[in-house]
Image (cartoon, rainbow, N blue to C red):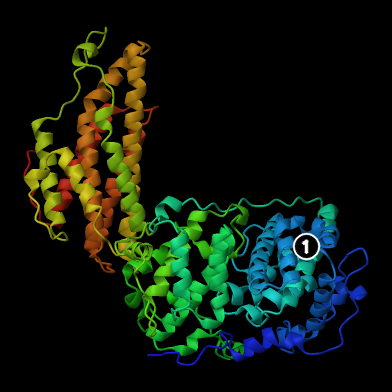
Amino acid sequence: MAIYNKPIKTCLSAEVHHMVCRLGLIELNSPELEHIVTVSGEICWEAITFYLRTSNTEEHDLDYVESVRLLGPVCKTVHVYLLSLNTQQFNNQYGLWFKWTNNTELFAEAFEAIRNSQYTAVPLSLMKLTACLERALGDVFLMVGNECPFLLRDLLASQELAAIFGQNVMNVLRVFLGSPQSLNLRNILWHGFAAPPEIPPMYTSMLLLLTAGLGQKLKDVLACRNLSLLHRPYFKLTQLKELAVFPDINEEAIAAAEDIIEKSDFVVEIMLPYWKDALAAYKDQRYADCTILLLPQLEMGLRKFFTIVNNCPNRLLTAEIIFVLLFQSTTLYTTFDEILAKYLDNGVINHLPTALGNPIMEILWDLLNHQEGPRLRDHLSHGEIDLKLFPREMASHLVALAVVLLHHCHRGANGISLESECLKTIMCSTHSYCSRFHPVGKLKQKLRCCLESLQKWGEMPRPTLEQAFDRPGSDYSGPTIQTVHQSLMEGLVSALINRLQMVYDEDLDPLHYLLAEEQLHLVAKLLTNRICTLYCPRVVLEVVSLLRKIASQCLTVSQQIMHGVVSRHQQWLSKSLRSRQRQNYLRMLGSIQYLHHIFILLTLLVTVELLNAQTMKDDASSEYHCYLKFLKSVLQYTENMVTYTSPDKNKWNESWDLSEKMLLKVKKFYNKWYNITVDCAT
């Protein structure tokens, strides 16, 4: 097992460290400022692109090493120039040219950071700057292109941006941000590799000036081509209630966290300033800054723990570029994707999930990976979140998660006490966590909504029997739950209970669950069962996808019926229903009890099949395909019921007939495939 006995001095590999920390600082003749920036503040792109160099390879791509070396003095000149300006001068000269980014304030903050040279302020500003720049360039791309590339390096290499700004201009940006062979400033910061002093501040200054220069060029392009720049709406973090697993972080929790970071070897010592400033930002209510500082360090801490439990210390650093080129490796460095995966890139099992445990792994997957979750690092690092409106709840969640990881991954001799009640509460909050954003978690949420809706059917207003028949033309005698139908449904309940016993340890008496109310209680109880969602087989995801659709349609039917009953009852009381509408209303009332039982039964069916799904393995058998066909037939029934119960259809007799056919089909399926005898009259 890999253990780091010696202090880690850098997380940059030798080649990357040389490229980022030294190459551009080599003493060369610096260009005169007036060759780069005019007196009026206009950026002279030709003077900057003059220092670009291409390689001798067949592709004639950029020679990143030589371009960085030659552009270094340009960056130094720009840095000295910006340091000579005060805030008002900078804003007067360049404020207008940052408007195209839709975040002028962020660039003003970056300018203040390089002037004040606070320890983590420059890398923090650079992370925010690169995210904002990527988002703004994506908006420009969409003026002429269709689908914006997800990766910044692909965006910078796009023909669409080259057509707007010019290829050489884009090549300058690629030297700083666009390739693993370049300075790659965005990635080494956002993935937690660069310690605070390792990024020369002059690169932040250069990117500030380049962003202003892009604004100047864009103004001419918009005027010449009669184009308009539209900004995409920000991604909204709407999942805060679903993420609410930890207690809110207060002063006591922050104090405990400040104590832990000094002791836990989860923290790489050279990164300690990031941790301290993240907590300070939280106390100052700068929640976006707190999150941006913490996320890369959680990745770095997990990367360190990952290399220990998997005995692969070489994965702690960025990869050597020459290795990537020679062996055509796609793994430039170990990121959250690899850290949270089931297997290592060599096919060996990843031991980190076992070391962390399922609850913590599911919290991480919910926060970072699941498509229906917040995917916090992706959205934040790509500039898709409005930093000015960043929610405190999200920062609180991240700080609490950091405390859990600091404690859980601690392996050193320094003990971490759990005397603090606040700390105990945070740690205990993870024990029963189940994924909220995995498809299984989303299905459980939908089923809870179905339960809540179905439980409200008893509250629906309806006329008394005497009221129903004291109106002219109200002599309709609708369907009732006949003995044959009741027997069929009771048999299906028994079948479902028997099916459930295949995966459920507690003994259940089918007779106890014949009442609809008891079925609802059983579903609520079953939904509290923990279902592991990590690395679900494909077949499980296929089944869960169908079950989610069924549950969604069931909820729609329930809501439509409730809304229809309330609306029709109001019309009944006001005597505004015509004769035909009264007949239809009475048919609706006659169907309600029967449909209520059926949709409770369907909710139980979906819940039982969800629990059984977790036992499935990848399977291409005919039985599995018949099972999917059965679920699709149930889905078809619920979709038809959505149509029949809609306000513009109100086909209650058809609903009755369709439901009877569905029950018979379910009976036939369970009899055939699970050898469960459903005794009922036909």
Q: Residues within 10 Å of mark 1 (few under 14, many from 20)?
A: many
Q: Nearer the viewer, residue 355 or 229?
A: 355
Where does the image place residue 253, in percent across and percent down from the top left?
44, 63
Tell me what residue is drawn at x 48 percent, y 55 percent: 393
Q: Quadrant of the C terminus?
A: top left
Tell me what residue is drawn at x 30 percent, y 58 percent: 543
- Is 435 placed left or right of 397 in the picture? left
Label 1: element kind: helix
Q: Nearer the viewer, residue 597 or 236?
A: 236
Q: Tell me which amino acid carries mark 1.
A: Ile
Tell me what residue is drawn at x 56 percent, y 88 percent: 9
Residue topped by disc 1: 164
Give the answer, above or below, for where 131 lies relative to 297: above
Q: Quadrant of residue 98?
A: bottom right
Where does the image place residue 64, in percent across and percent down from the top left?
72, 84
Q: Quadrant of the N terminus?
A: bottom left
Give the answer, above or below, for where 265 lies relative to 5: above
- Is 260 placed left or right of 637 in the picture? right
Where does the image place residue 665, in percent across and percent down from the top left?
19, 45
